[in-house]
Image (tube, coloured by chain):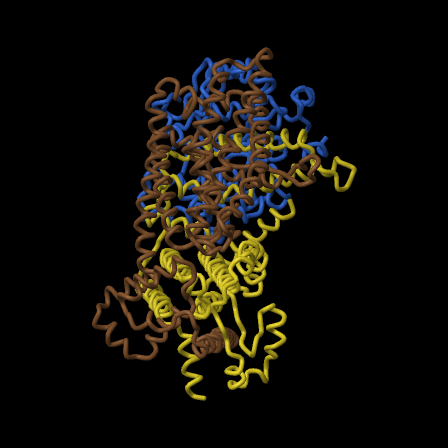
Chain colours: A yellow, B brown, C blue
């Protein structure tokens, strides 16, 4: 119960974030939806051992968060809370895929004087990597594991940024403009609207029960669970009927229209084009690698 | 279980998106054609109900773990498969956007796994067929027990089958994506039994709630059943079963078609986008770039990170890279150029630092502006 | 349109399970009148209101709203001329934002798009909450929700306002604001309520219902002095009158 209510506060908070007034917020929702989809699509299109090439993509969340003035600590916290899922799936990889596919010559690194700042040998010990003759050998499993984690944070942050800069109803409107069938859009809007009402109702029922059970942490029995859910369902059905009445009284005849001004102007085109260009560049050129090569040449 | 973006390849993700989108389109059309206006609020509020109902947990005896109401099956029983599918889709969409359950690319998979199987397979083929026998009789004390039993059996089997299929789909999708290393068999052995247990819990709760509703307000179920499912299907059972069959066939075709095209595209060109880029930019540019160190090392790095690992990638690099640039394959692809990987490491760290610096700088500038 | 009469003629309603909902209800409400509908829980107030907006069809008897008899054919026209404020504002505010909610009725009744924003803001200004237009309903307080619910109804400029328990669940200040607001409305008003003090302030006429039938219909002040009648119908003398003995 606590969990879902916390989630509700989360949604509340993200809703509030979506109401702020930065120029990112004022962009047409369609531009943000498209950019997010492109971002997610490109990020997941990499091979499973890619790590370095994914790093530049962090620029997108970082810049969006600062432009849109989002609370970075909050978003990171939210992401960390979601981590375990990807972690548990990904963590199998290092155990199964043990072929060494990456070797890093430590002697080479010592040339770069990095060893002065980071004690790599300790790092290697902690990571449980084999260390033979100054060469770190990293198995494919570890690479793909880190790749999964990076992808996960990138895609999740993109979704969170979308929702907290745009707001759910604007995302729905954007989807409607993209020709998503209207029953589905209406369904999404109603679900979102009444989620708050019904979760509130459910939590009141749960609270009422726990106040009448004198054993503090007594478990909910199945025989109690069923009538409770049943009651909630009946109330929900009644509510649906009342809402339908209220809709009919205001002339509802099966169509829901909304008058919203949406303007897809120069700003939106530049936003999409700019990010698309950046993403494609990041996709085509391994910037970190080239940077590294450049640097090592200087030495 | 929810699929996650990180575990899914674009080919699988897109295939399932196409399949799910066409299902949503089909259901929307279907729903619109039958007494839609009354159902608008009903669908929405029941979607919210699924959320709220998940707050109420009961304790499963002996195990000590807790269970709650599942979604797809009870919605199908209350509203019929089409509305139930749309409602499940909306629930999962909200979850993916706010709780980042799954993610955007995996949304197609999740809607399919958790919506399609219970609504379009388990409900019409199993639940309906079992409950049909007792449905036409009015609810009375004589046949009450018999009815309860049929509902329980129907919901139980349908839930189990629906979830087993969903779990199997998760395994298949993960396998085809090839991001996770879990072997097919192990994953399958992990997923199926867990979902058997979940299916039993979902079946029992669904049946209990349906029986509760039937006793308290029989007209709700009657009207729900008559508008879009049972009695209707009795009148014209031919057309009804045909429509379900059409859905299944359509879905299968869409999956095979999109999946086939995309996987062909992906397998013959491991980097679809890049391939498209080169294709559009033409060979000329490719040639001029060949001399440039950066582009060459980019490809080289790709080989370094994707060595001959397993037969699949071997075949891949042979068939594809060789045609593009034979020199690269000849170079010893199994031995990783230490210099290259170190460059990647150093460059990656630098890029990361750079990103953070940009963020901090932007933030600074911003706060300065607001202060002044 | 000059006579916004609400007329009920010998209304009977029996619920499907056999309970009597309405029993021989007849009344006539004239243009501009404010009528309070009072009675204990289950006396039939809500049932009567549902009949007036055409959501329930009487088992026997007729309803006339304005120039039309209430039937399937006239339903849309009747609903256009009546506005119903429901008891739970959450049922009435179903759109993503306050603006969309107020605009909902306008769009359905075919108001041209260019005028919609204007009329929405006008309605919100009347109830005193123009600043809420971009907010989502789930983030409003109880009082704000009620105000917006009223705005959604008056936006379409109905002739007759029908309200179910408008002052329930409001804090005293919000209730006072509501009463002052309702006093300024010149619509024909039919208000079902338990809040007799509010009825006393707003409505010059009161209809008392008991067990589905009308047991009194007359001047509010006079009726509320009749303690026997009030007791009989599960009511109590309004607090403001208790001191005036």
Residue pushed farthest bottom? A299
Residue C167: percent from left, percent from top: 59, 37
Exactly how many numbered labels are in the figure?
0
Relative to A184, say whether A43 is above or below.
Answer: below
Q: Position of residue B359 (x, y in %)?
A: 49, 73
- Return the x and y of residue B293 as percentages of the image width and height: 33, 79
Q: Nearer the viewer, residue B366 or B302?
A: B302
Is residue B69 visible in the rendered structure shown here?
Answer: yes
Q: Is residue A13 left or right of residue B322?
A: right
Determine the image quadrant of residue B308.
bottom left
For this rendering, which residue is in front, B64 or A108?
A108
Residue A143 or residue C180, whichever sits in front: A143
Q: Residue at x 67, y 23 (%)?
A: C234
Residue furthest out toward the right: A214
Q: Residue at x 29, y 66 (%)?
A: B322
Say if A40 sits above or below A222 in the image: below
Q: Position of residue C50 (x, y in %)?
A: 49, 25
- Res B229 → quadrant: top left
Q: Is residue B366 visible?
A: no
């Amino acid at each position: 119960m606590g969990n879902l209510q916390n989630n509700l506060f989360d949604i509340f908070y993200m809703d509030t974030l979506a109401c702020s007034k930065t120029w990112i917020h004022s962009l047409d929702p369609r531009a943000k939806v498209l950019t997010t989809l492109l971002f997610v699509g490109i990020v997941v299109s990499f091979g499973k051992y890619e790590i370095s090439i994914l790093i530049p993509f962090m620029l997108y969340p970082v810049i969006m968060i600062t432009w849109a003035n989002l609370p970075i600590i909050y978003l990171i916290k939210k992401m960390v809370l979601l981590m375990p899922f990807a972690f548990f799936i990904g963590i199998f990889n290092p155990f199964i895929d043990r072929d060494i596919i990456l070797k890093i010559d430590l002697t080479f690194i010592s040339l770069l004087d990095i060893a002065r700042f980071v004690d790599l040998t300790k790092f290697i010990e902690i990571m449980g990597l084999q260390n033979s003759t100054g060469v770190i050998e990293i198995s494919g499993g570890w690479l793909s594991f880190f790749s999964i984690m990076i992808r996960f944070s990138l895609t999740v942050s993109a979704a969170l940024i979308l929702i907290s800069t745009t707001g759910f109803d604007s995302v729905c409107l954007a989807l409607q403009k993209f020709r998503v069938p209207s029953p589905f859009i209406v369904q999404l809007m109603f679900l979102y609207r009444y989620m708050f009402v019904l979760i509130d109702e459910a939590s009141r029922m749960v609270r009422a029960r726990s106040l009448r059970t004198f054993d503090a942490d007594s478990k909910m029995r199945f025989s109690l669970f069923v009538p409770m859910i049943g009651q909630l369902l009946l109330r929900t059905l009644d509510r649906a009927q009342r809402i339908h009445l209220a809709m009919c009284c205001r002339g509802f005849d099966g169509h829901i229209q909304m008058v919203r001004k949406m303007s897809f102007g120069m700003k939106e085109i530049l936003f999409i084009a700019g990010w698309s260009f950046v993403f494609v560049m990041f996709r085509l050129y391994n910037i970190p690698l080239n940077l590294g090569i450049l640097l090592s040449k200087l030495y | 279980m929810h699929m996650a973006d990180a575990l899914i390849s674009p080919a699988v993700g897109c295939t399932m998106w196409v399949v799910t989108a066409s299902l949503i389109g089909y259901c929307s059309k279907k729903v619109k054609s039958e007494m839609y206006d009354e159902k608008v609020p009903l669908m929405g509020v029941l979607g919210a109900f699924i959320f709220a109902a998940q707050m109420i947990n009961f304790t499963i005896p002996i195990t000590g773990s807790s269970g709650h109401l599942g979604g797809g099956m009870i919605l199908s029983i209350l509203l019929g498969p089409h509305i139930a599918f749309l409602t499940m889709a909306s629930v999962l969409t909200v979850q993916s956007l706010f709780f980042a359950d799954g993610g955007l690319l995996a949304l197609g998979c999740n809607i399919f796994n958790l919506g399609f199987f219970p609504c379009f397979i388990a409900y019409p083929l199993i639940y309906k067929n079992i409950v049909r026998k007792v449905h036409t009789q009015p609810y009375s004390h004589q046949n009450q027990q018999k009815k309860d039993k049929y509902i329980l059996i129907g919901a139980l089997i349908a839930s189990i089958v629906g979830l087993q299929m969903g779990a199997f789909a998760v395994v298949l999708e993960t396998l085809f994506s090839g991001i996770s290393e879990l072997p097919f068999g192990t994953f399958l052995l992990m997923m199926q039994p867990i979902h058997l247990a979940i299916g039993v819990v979902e079946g029992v709760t669904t049946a209990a709630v349906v029986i509760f509703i039937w006793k308290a307000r029989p007209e709700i179920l009657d009207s729900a059943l008559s508008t879009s499912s049972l009695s209707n299907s009795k009148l014209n059972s031919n057309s009804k079963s045909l429509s379900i069959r059409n859905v299944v066939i359509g879905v299968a075709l869409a999956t095979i078609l999109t999946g086939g095209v995309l996987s062909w595209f992906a397998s013959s060109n491991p980097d679809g986008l890049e391939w498209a880029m080169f294709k559009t930019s033409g060979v000329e540019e490719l040639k001029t770039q060949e001399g440039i160190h950066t582009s060459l090392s980019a490809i080289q790095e790709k080989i370094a990170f994707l060595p001959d690992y397993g037969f699949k990638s071997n075949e891949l690099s042979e068939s594809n890279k060789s045609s593009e640039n034979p020199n690269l394959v000849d170079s010893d692809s199994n031995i990783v150029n230490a210099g290259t990987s170190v460059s990647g490491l150093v460059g990656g760290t630098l890029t990361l630092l750079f990103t953070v610096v940009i963020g901090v700088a932007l933030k600074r500038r911003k706060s300065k502006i607001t202060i002044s | 349109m000059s006579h916004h009469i609400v007329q009920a003629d010998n209304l009977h309603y029996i619920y499907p399970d056999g309970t009597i909902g309405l029993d021989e209800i007849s009344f006539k409400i004239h243009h501009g009148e404010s009528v309070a509908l009072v009675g204990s829980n289950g006396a039939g107030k809500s049932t009567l209101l549902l009949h007036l907006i055409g959501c329930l069809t009487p088992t026997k008897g007729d309803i006339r709203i304005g120039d039309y008899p209430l039937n399937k054919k006239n339903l849309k026209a009747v609903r256009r001329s009546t506005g119903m404020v429901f008891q739970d504002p959450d049922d009435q505010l179903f759109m993503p934002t306050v603006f969309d909610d107020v605009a909902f009725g306008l769009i359905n009744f075919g108001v041209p798009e260019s005028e919609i924003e204007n009329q929405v803001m006008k309605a919100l200004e009347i109830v005193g909450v123009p600043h809420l237009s971009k907010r989502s309903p789930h983030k409003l307080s109880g009082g704000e929700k009620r105000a917006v619910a009223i705005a959604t109804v008056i936006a379409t400029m109905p002739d007759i306002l029908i309200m179910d328990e408008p002052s329930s669940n409001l804090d005293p200040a919000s209730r006072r604001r509501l009463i002052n607001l309702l006093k300024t409305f010149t619509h024909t008003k039919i208000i079902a309520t338990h809040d007799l003090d509010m009825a006393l302030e707003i409505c010059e006429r009161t209809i008392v219902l008991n067990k589905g039938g009308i047991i009194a219909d007359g001047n509010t002040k006079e009726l509320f002095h009749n303690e026997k009648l009030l007791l009989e119908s599960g009511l109590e003398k309004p607090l403001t009158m208790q001191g005036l003995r």
